């Protein structure tokens, strides 16, 4: 049963940790094979499932140690139908691995949650396409239809919300929001940006957030930025525009590489962790006053 679906505790403004670059960790640090960056595929072996459990326990232990809240994302960024087809999953097998991902996080929550460390379970939904390059751009309705199956599967589990990670264009974000609303689930939209602070389509971050809010009557609980180094977007989140107040979460890259460079990199670029921490503190202190959900992406 969902625990926080009707009252997300991170909306109160307390500090919440979320996880980091799961693909980075499992590929570069654990040495695991993940075709198409599909972390959910690891459930097929005891070794893979053990690696997933270890990964999520690491963040639960950190949150418990530092008395913070925690948002855990299911390892399902690639667990939608097109990617499932590439990996040979039937519709039912794909739905079951989404449900299994939630059950794993329920076990983590049962083990680690305390009054000081509320643990929110988020159903992670990724882009239909590459994530860095918006190739075959869908309409709002096409995106809603595409993502509906995964979102509806999550609605039947204990997830408290769904989070769309690495959205690169607004139509997909709007459609996914529509799918979440139809399933009566809260939703968070996380955009990625290029080194100039703009979406891969060239649209400004502010226009993208405002467009989604306008098209959905402000349905997303909040917005995030992920898969970009703070130096890529810090220059576009200053000022007092209303859209800036909608950004509550960051899952920034420790690596300052561009998306193109990351795609071609055969080695882990872990960046500078201390510098990344200072960047987060500066953004929280001066530019993103409602920021309270902190995690990572590539290199973290």
Image: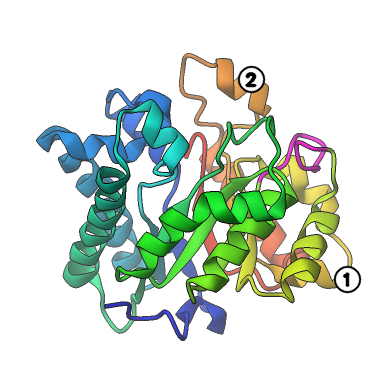
Find disc 2 in the rendering and name its residue. Answer: 261
Say whether residue 249 is visible: no
Q: Is residue 67 above or below residue 104?
A: below
Q: Secondary structure at mark 2?
A: helix
Q: Is residue 160 above or below residue 205?
A: below
Distance from Cα at disc 2 to Cα at disc 1: 33 Å
In the picture, measured across the screen, residue 175 lies left or right of residue 21, that is right
Residue 278 screen position, x and y as percent: 63, 51
Residue 291 screen position, x and y as percent: 64, 68
In the picture, measured across the screen, residue 164 lies left or right of residue 243, that is left
Name the one closer to the observer, 146 or 193: 146
Magenta-drawn stretch contains 34? no
Find disc 1 in the rendering and name its residue. Answer: 240
In the picture, measured across the screen, residue 100 lies left or right of residue 116, that is left
Badge 2 crowding class, 10 Å Cα cut-off, few under 14, some 14 to 19, many 20 or more, is few
- Which image quadrant is residue 227 in? top right
Label the magenta part by its dominant secondary structure. Answer: loop
Residue drawn 32% across the image and 77% down it: 2
Colour convention? rainbow
Which contiguous range is marked in magenta? 192-201
Q: Quadrant of the N terminus?
A: bottom left
- Which image quadrant is residue 229 in? top right
Residue drawn 66% across the image and 21% down it: 260
Say whether residue 211 is visible: yes
Residue drawn 68% across the image and 43% down it: 138
């Amino acid at each position: 049963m969902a625990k926080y679906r009707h009252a997300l505790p991170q909306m109160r403004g307390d500090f919440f940790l979320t996880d980091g670059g799961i693909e980075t960790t499992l590929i570069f640090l654990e040495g695991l094979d993940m075709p198409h960056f599909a972390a959910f595929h690891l459930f097929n072996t005891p070794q893979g499932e053990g690696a997933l459990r270890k990964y999520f326990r690491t963040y639960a232990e950190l949150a418990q140690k530092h008395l913070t809240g925690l948002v855990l994302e299911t390892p399902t960024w690639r667990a939608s139908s097109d990617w499932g087809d590439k990996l040979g999953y039937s519709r039912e097998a794909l739905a079951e691995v989404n449900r299994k991902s939630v059950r794993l996080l329920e076990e983590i929550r049962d083990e680690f949650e305390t009054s000081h460390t509320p643990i929110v379970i988020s159903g992670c939904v990724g882009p239909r396409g590459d994530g860095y390059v918006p190739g075959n751009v869908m309409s709002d309705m096409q995106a809603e239809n595409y993502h509906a199956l995964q979102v509806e599967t999550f609605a039947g589990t204990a997830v408290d919300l769904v989070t769309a990670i690495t959205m690169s264009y607004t139509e997909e974000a709007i459609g996914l929001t529509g799918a979440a609303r139809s399933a009566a689930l809260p939703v968070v939209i996380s955009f990625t940006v290029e080194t100039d602070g703009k979406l891969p389509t060239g649209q400004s971050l502010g226009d993208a957030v405002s467009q989604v809010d306008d098209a959905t009557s402000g349905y997303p609980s909040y917005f995030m930025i992920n898969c970009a180094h703070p130096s890529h977007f810090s220059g576009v989140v200053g000022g007092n525009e209303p859209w800036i107040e909608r950004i509550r979460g960051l899952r920034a890259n420790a690596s300052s590489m561009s998306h193109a460079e990351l795609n071609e990199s055969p080695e882990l670029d872990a960046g500078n962790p201390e510098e990344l921490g200072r960047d987060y503190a500066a953004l929280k202190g001066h530019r993103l006053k409602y920021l309270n959900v902190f995690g990572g992406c590539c290199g973290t």
